[in-house]
């Protein structure tokens, strides 16, 4: 198979891939909705398609971060933005801890577990964005 060199054909190929991705995602969402209706939330999340859907969303989000960093208009300090992000993430995590600990049927350990998960899952993208901004600033 010969490599496409014409930019118009490359753009058309990328648009075709995007349309295919959208159709595939809608199909996966349809299967998951069917499982949700017939088997409930546990049945939906037990389906291996759920894992594919979540992983696709995560990969898409990380790829979108790369593009958004390259097109940022303000070129502020990446360290300052990281500190702001860490402050907001910490505040949101503490709110999760507090509200879950105060909810009937849950205790402080449940709040700490959920808050810790939210913190870790938010800190990883923040450091990834920091690395991208550092790389963009240097290059």
Image (tube, rainbow, N blue to C red):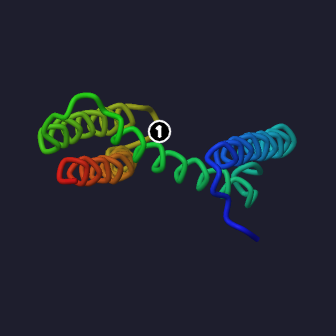
Please give the name of the residue rendered at 71% of the width and 42% of the height, measured from the top-left corner.
Answer: 12
Please give the name of the residue rendered at 76% of the width and 57% of the height, measured from the top-left corner.
Answer: 47
Quadrant in which the N terminus is drawn: bottom right
Q: Is residue 60 left or right of residue 133?
A: right
Q: Is residue 18 left or right of residue 82?
A: right
Q: Is residue 97 left or right of residue 55?
A: left
Q: Quadrant of residue 51?
A: bottom right
* Residue toward you, 103 or 25: 25
Residue 67 x, y percent position in the rendering: 42, 43
5, above or below 110, in the image: below
Element carrying mark 1: loop
Q: Residue furthest top?
A: 73
Q: Residue furthest bottom?
A: 1
Residue matched to label 1: 105
Please give the name of the residue rendered at 63% of the width and 57% of the height, measured from the top-left corner.
Answer: 5
Residue 95 x, y percent position in the rendering: 30, 32
How packed mark 1 is, by other alpha carbons closer than 10 Å (few <14, some 14-19, many 20 or more), is: few
* Residue toward you, 4 or 97: 4
* Residue toward you, 94 or 56: 56
Residue 59 x, y percent position in the rendering: 53, 53
* Residue toward you, 38 or 20: 20
Counting labels gives: 1
Please give the name of the residue rendered at 74% of the width and 44% of the height, measured from the top-left corner.
Answer: 16
Q: Is residue 75 left or right of residue 54?
A: left
Q: Quadrant of residue 30?
A: top right
Residue 110 x, y percent position in the rendering: 39, 48
């Amino acid at each position: 198979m010969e490599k496409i060199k014409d930019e118009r054909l490359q753009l058309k190929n990328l648009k075709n891939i995007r349309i295919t991705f959208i159709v595939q995602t809608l199909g996966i969402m349809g299967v998951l909705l069917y499982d949700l209706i017939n088997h409930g939330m546990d049945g939906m999340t037990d389906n291996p398609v759920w894992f594919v859907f979540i992983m696709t969303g995560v990969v898409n989000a990380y790829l979108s971060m790369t593009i958004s960093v390259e097109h940022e208009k303000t070129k502020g300090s990446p360290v300052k933005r990281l500190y702001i992000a860490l402050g907001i993430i910490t505040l949101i995590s503490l709110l999760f801890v507090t509200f879950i600990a105060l909810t009937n049927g849950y205790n402080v350990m449940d709040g700490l577990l959920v808050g810790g998960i939210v913190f870790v899952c938010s800190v990883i993208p923040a450091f990834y964005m920091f690395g991208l901004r550092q790389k963009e600033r240097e290059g």
